[in-house]
Amino acid sequence: MQILIAGAGHGGLAAGAILAKAGHSVTVVEQAAREQLGHDWEDRFTFSVLTDALGITESELPPEIWRDRGDCTFISPNGQTHVDIHFDSNSRQRVMWRKPLLAMLLEHADACGVRFRFETQVTAPLLDGQRVAGLRTQAGDFIADLVIDAAGVFSPVRTNLPEALGIEKYPRRGDLFYARRVYFDRLPDVTAADIPFEVYLRHVGEEGLSWFCTNPDSVDVLIGRIDPLTDEQFETLLARFRAAHPWMGTRIVHGGQSGVIPVRRPLTRMVADGYAAVGDSAFMTTPMNGMGIDLSLRAGKLLAETVLAHPDCTAQNLWQYNREFHRLYGGDTARNAGLKSALLSLPAQDVDFLFAARVVESSDLAGGGRNVNIPALLGKLRRGMKKPSAFFTVVNGLMRGGRAAKLYKKAPEVFSPDAVAQWDRSITELDFPID
Ligand SMILES: Cc1cc2nc3c(=O)[nH]c(=O)nc-3n(C[C@H](O)[C@H](O)[C@H](O)COP(=O)(O)OP(=O)(O)OC[C@H]3O[C@@H](n4cnc5c(N)ncnc54)[C@H](O)[C@@H]3O)c2cc1C
C-alpha cells in the first residue's frame, strides 16, 4: 500500500514507522528542512509513550536531553492566591528537549524504512470525488491509498477537505492558544523563589496563561493567550516578569519562538475514505494544559494498528481508529475542555474568588484539570455559594464536559455518515459558549 504522511508531526512519524516496518511504502512530506524540525524548548509528556514508540527502554534515553521539573504553584489572576503542588518521586514532572525528541522519532522512522521529502509544502488533498487520493504539493501531485494528516493545527489537508464530509475545518475563538516562549539566562547571586515552576492562570486578568520556570541555569518564560500576542504586549509582560523576578537575565539562551496549541475537544470525525488525521491536525491535546505529544503518539499507534488489521482504507475501516481513540482518550479530553471553557468565560475577578475561597484546589489542578470530580466539587458548595454565578459556571462547564465525555466514548459502532453527523451534533450542542 502507498501511504503519504502530510507533515512530520509526532503521531504521523509513530504511525509511519509501524506501517513501513510492516512492509508498506510510506513517505512523509514535510515543509521544513530536517535540521529545522522541533522547537528549541523542553516539553512535559509521558516518557514511556515515547520509548514504546521507539522500542527502547527509558534507561536508554540520553540523560542530557531530559530533566525533572521542580514543584509547581498556580497563581490567581490578581496574584494574591497561590495553590502549591509538591510532587513526590512518582508524580514529579519530567521534561525533554523537543529537538532530540523529534530527532529520535525521525531516526526510528528512517530505520523502519520511512522515506522523507523535506522542504516540500503540502497545499491540499488530492481528491477523487469525496475520497482522498493523495496530496497536492508545491513539487506536484502524489497519489496514495492512504493520507495520514499530521500537518498540525492549520493543516491544509483538513481545511481543504470537501464540506460534505462533515469534518470540522476551522477552530473557533477560544479553541487555540497562541504562545511565545523564551529562555533567558539566570543571574547569579540573586536568590530565586522557593517553588520553581509558577503558573499564572488568567495572567494579569487576560484570557490565557503564562508561566515562569526557574531552572538551575536559565529561566523559561511562556506567555500564551487565546488571541495572537503583539510584540508590544509580549515585551510589557516580560518586563513585568523581570521586575518581579530579579534573577531573570536579558540574554536569550533558548527558544524565542511562537507556537499555536489547540486547546479544545478533539475532532469528532477525523477519517474519510483514504484519510485519517492524527495529533494537532485533529486537535488532540489536553485543553487545560495543552499537552499533545502523548496523545499524538498514542493515536499514531492506534491508527497504524487499525490500518494493519483492515488495509482497505475506507472510512468504514478507519472508523475503528476514530472510535477507539475517543473511547480511550478523546472523551477525557472533551471533559477537560468543559472546565477550560468555563474558567475562560469567567471574569478574572471570579477566578480570583474561586482560588481565594478554595473552590479550586491543588487536587483539581495537579492533573491539568483531569482530576476534577463533580461530587468533590459539589462538596465545595458552601464555600462557592458566596459567589453563585462563578460557582455554577464552573459546575456547568464540568457537567457539559462530563456529558460530552460520555458521548465521545460511545461513538457509533459502525460508520455511517448520517449516524456520525447526528452524534457530532449531540456533542456540538454541549459546547460551552465563549464570547
Ligand atoms: C509553546 C508550546 C509548548 C508546548 N508544550 C507541550 C508540552 O509540554 N507537552 C506536550 O505534550 N505538548 C506540548 N505542546 C503541544 C505539542 O507541541 C503538540 O500537541 C504536539 O507537537 C502534537 O502536534 P503534531 O505533532 O500533531 O503537530 P506539529 O508539532 O504541529 O507538527 C506538524 C508538522 O507538520 C509540518 N507542516 C505543517 N504544515 C505543513 C504543510 N503545509 N506542508 C508540509 N508540512 C507541514 C510542520 O512543519 C510540522 O513539522 C506545546 C506546544 C507549544 C506551541
Image (cartoon, grey):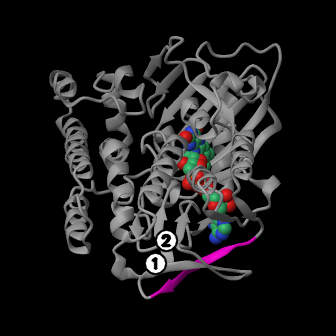
Decide: is 31 above or below 386: below
412 in the magenta segment: no
Q: Looking at the image, do the residues carrying marks 1 and 2 touch, with CB atoms under 8 Å apart?
A: yes
Magenta-highlighted residues: 120-128
Is most of the magenta stretch helix, strand or loop? strand
> Which residue type carries mark 2?
Arg
Q: In this view, does 112 lie to the left or right of 308?
A: right
Residue at figure coordinates x 62%, y 58% from the top left:
23
- Residue 23 vs 203, above or below: the answer is below
Residue drawn at x 24%, y 50% as measured from the top left: 404
Q: Who's the residue at 45% across and 24% down the image?
A: 80
The x and y percentages for residue 414 are: 24, 63
* Label 1: element kind: loop
Secondary structure at badge 2 equals helix
The N terminus sits in image quarter: bottom right
Name the residue carrying label 1. Answer: 161
Describe residue 108's horizontal placement relative to residue 262 as left or right: right
Residue 223 visible from this viewpoint = no
Farthest residue in the front direction? Answer: 23
Rendered image quadrant of residue 370: top left
In this figure, which residue is indicated by the disc labeled 2? 158
Q: Is mark 2 within 8 Å of ligand 1?
A: no
Where is residue 367 drawn, in percent x and y? 41, 29
- Say whether residue 158 is visible: yes
Residues packed near mark 1 inside 10 Å, few (<14), some (14 to 19) or many (20 plus): many
| Residue 417 picture location, percent across and down | 26, 73
Amino acid identity at mark 1: Leu
Determine the CA span between mark 1 and mark 2. Answer: 5 Å
Report whether 213 appears left or right of 275: right
Image coordinates for residue 132, horizontal then vertical, percent: 49, 78
